[in-house]
Amino acid sequence: MKLLVVDDHPVLREGLVALLRQLGPDAVVLEAGDAQAALRLVEEQQDLDVVILDLVMPGMNGLSALPEFGRSRPDLPVIVLSSSEEPRDARNALAQGALGYVPKSASQHTLISAIKLVLQGEIYVPPLVLSEMGARAGSTPSRGQDGGSNLTPRQIEVLRRLSEGQPNKIIAHELNLSEKTVKAHITAIFKALNVVNRTQAAAVGRESGLI
């Protein structure tokens, strides 16, 4: 597993590197002090699995960098780790393509859990956003909403297998795709259906007649 930590504070980066190495003996953690350096590393390191990104940095800030990461590597998940606990900042980061938002005040366990969740193709939405989203996060879109019409046939097939409880590895094997491609499809499915996890996606897919 290869991770990239992007933060302009060296002490914080060092702490994160030590923490992330606990993910396993094969965990490799790279560092960047700003978004521009991070984007160069993303281009060079094609086997990166996840990026941990700060929002407030000199030069290009994290929010502006998120779409750039998406254009450069649409299959590469980015998790924002920010000092801000404003729901607005978390919503903006998720809207710009982040697959997770973790306040720096959260526990180490929360960050590790968020990384593992995102690597499984899910989106980590912090409690501060869920409480703000209210019914939007806890309910499913109605049949009349047309998010499902934006799904490709391949994404509908992924959604069908996802609803059957198949893990990403099995979906990738049976559809002859890479796991990163499956994760990218799942991310697109979540956004199109306006959901935040597999359970909601499956419910909306069935309600909409997609699967």
Image: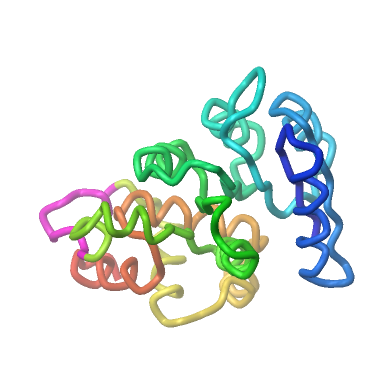
The residue located at (34%, 66%) in the rendering is 201
The residue located at (30%, 71%) in the rendering is 211
Query: In which quarter of the view is residue 157 placed?
Result: bottom left
Name the spot of residue 13 as percent of width and height, x first.
Answer: 77, 45
- Residue furthest out toward the left: 144
- Residue furthest out toward the top: 59
Q: Is residue 114 above or below residue 40?
A: below
Name the spot of residue 81 as percent of width and height, x first.
Answer: 59, 47
Query: In which quarter of the view is residue 18 placed?
Result: bottom right
For this view, does 148 lie left or right of residue 63? Answer: left
Quick one: quadrant of the N terminus?
bottom right
Name the spot of residue 127 as percent of width and height, x first.
Answer: 38, 61
Residue 18: say if magenta.
no
The magenta stretch is 139-149
The residue located at (37%, 50%) in the rendering is 191
Please identify the dominant SS of the magenta region. loop
In depth, the one of 78 and 132 nearer the eye is: 132
